Image (tube, grey):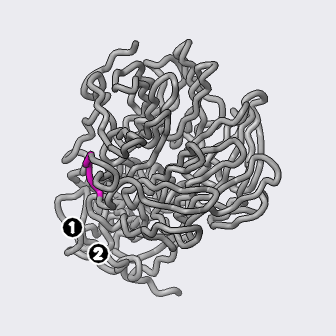
Amino acid sequence: MTPRVRAPELPQNYLWFNTDQPLSLKELKGRVVILDFWTYCCINCLHILPDLKYLEQKYRDSLTVIGVHSAKFDNEKETENIRQAILRYDIEHPVLVDRDFRVWQEYTVRAWPTLVVIDPESYVIASVSGEGNRDVLDEFIAKLINQHQEKGTLNFQELSLTLEKQRQPLITPLAFPGKVLATASGLFIADSGHHRLVRSSFDGEILHVIGTGKPGFIDGDFSEAQFFAPQGMAFDEENQILYIADTENHALRRVDLRHQLVKTIAGTGKQSRNIHPHSGAGLETELNSPWDLVKVGNNLFIAMAGPHQIWQMDLETGIINTYAGTGAEACVDGSLTESAFAQPSGITTDGKELYIADSEVSSIRSVGIVEPRQVKTVCGSGGLFSFGDVDGQGENVRLQHCLGVEYAQNYLWVADTYNHKIKLVSPSTRNCQTVLGDGSAGLQDGEGKNSRFFEPSGLSVINSHLYVADTNNHVIRRVDLNTFEVTTLKFPGLCAPDVCIPPNF
């Protein structure tokens, strides 16, 4: 018989979120405990949050989930950044900040995400890594509760917690805007934290609010449609059609501005578990966290963050398919079929190449859409654990979890998200230089490197202005490309969904 292993006690002198005081396994005795080892950059970690929420609600009087945040990137070690991630992803269980990987090592964890199950007598009895384990865990927890109910070792009571979102409600007009798109028809903003889209003039006048502001998956007119953390967008100016990567619905949506209707064009609302290259009819094919879009002719190209691939959708036939990437999480150059990406989160084009912000390898990649169709690394080292903040050329460049990229006039603007900077890259020389931001998180207008951003994620250029989705500042910034002067846009007609109902025009 295998000896049972006593669960190491949780540190009481570390930082905790979503609770007024540190939790100990001693006081949680009588409850099932799941430790979720995660880091907020990781798409796989984000994918299991809905599973944990489901289990927490189902077994609320006998199960406690504790997030153990063991940071990958330097930026993820910062207290305020972790708090913002908890707010952004609506995490409602206690989170322990695992300084220096102490708890990770004590529980011999090897990968993100890993779930460790502790029984009501404080013994480690199971551990599972990766996604897609909800049903197995559900069955396991139910059996565990029955066993300990019979033994009389279960303590039924609901924990009372003080959540970060109660301390810091999201009542700003925008909440964690992920992407922005500047077009001749105005500015489109993915108001990701409010689960809606906003269309405005370049002066901040609100033209449309698209979506109820509640997370959901509903087609229909602008006042009834629902999205779930939408991100990247592409616009068909001629037909006045906006395409959206509806990220947490694992779907692509189409907004007809003339008729003010939202329609799903790809995805079923269910996350795909198939990472092998495949194709199918748009509405019959499950997708996996589409994060950004670009339109080339009658094709949409999609940065599909979940399976680490680039996808393509033919808008005439409705067929969607894997375009590049094996599904492995890595940085591999070469042909479309042998290439590999790592959580691609931004996409743009010059008409011949796609350019990708490949976030988990902190690199900018290029993908050919005319012969020869090859994948190359423009800048960054391409290593999963190789990151930093170094300007320079090619593989000597260091970025930190870049999420946005925009092609304009032979250059690439890059949102170097975790360095809180905007950088300029030449695809031809592979040179990368910091242009905006001093590297400290903050909200500061000014010129060039005298400005400050807080995890900027989306970029768009029109004429002589660059627009930035400054995600953790909950604002859109405008940059005059002649002077590099940064200003913050105001939207006087906009407010949070729960605060007021803005008019639709």
Q: Residue at x 58, y 29 (%)?
A: 235
Mark closest to the chain's N terminus, 1 or 2:
2
Instruction: Write down the residue under mark 1.
Output: 22
**Residue 133 screen position, x and y as percent:** 55, 59
> Can residue 102 be seen from the camera position used here?
yes
Q: Are the two marked residues, 1 and 2, in contact with CB atoms closer than 8 angstroms?
A: yes
Can you say which quadrant of the picture contains the C terminus?
top left
Instruction: Residue lying at the far right in this picture: please name it.
Output: 371
Count the numbered circles shown. Answer: 2
- Amino acid type indicated by mark 1: Pro
Element under label 1? loop
Q: Which residue is mark 2?
A: 10
Q: Is residue 92 visible?
A: no
Q: How many residues crowd around disc 1 within 10 Å: few (fewer than 14), some, or many (20 or more)? A: some
Does dot 2 land on a helix, a strand or a loop?
loop
Q: Magenta: predominant secondary structure element?
A: loop
Q: Position of residue 65 (x, y in %)?
A: 36, 60
Q: CA distance from mark 1 to mark 2?
A: 9 Å
Q: Is 163 positioned to the left or the right of 429 in the image?
A: left
For the magenta stretch, what is the residue range? 441-445
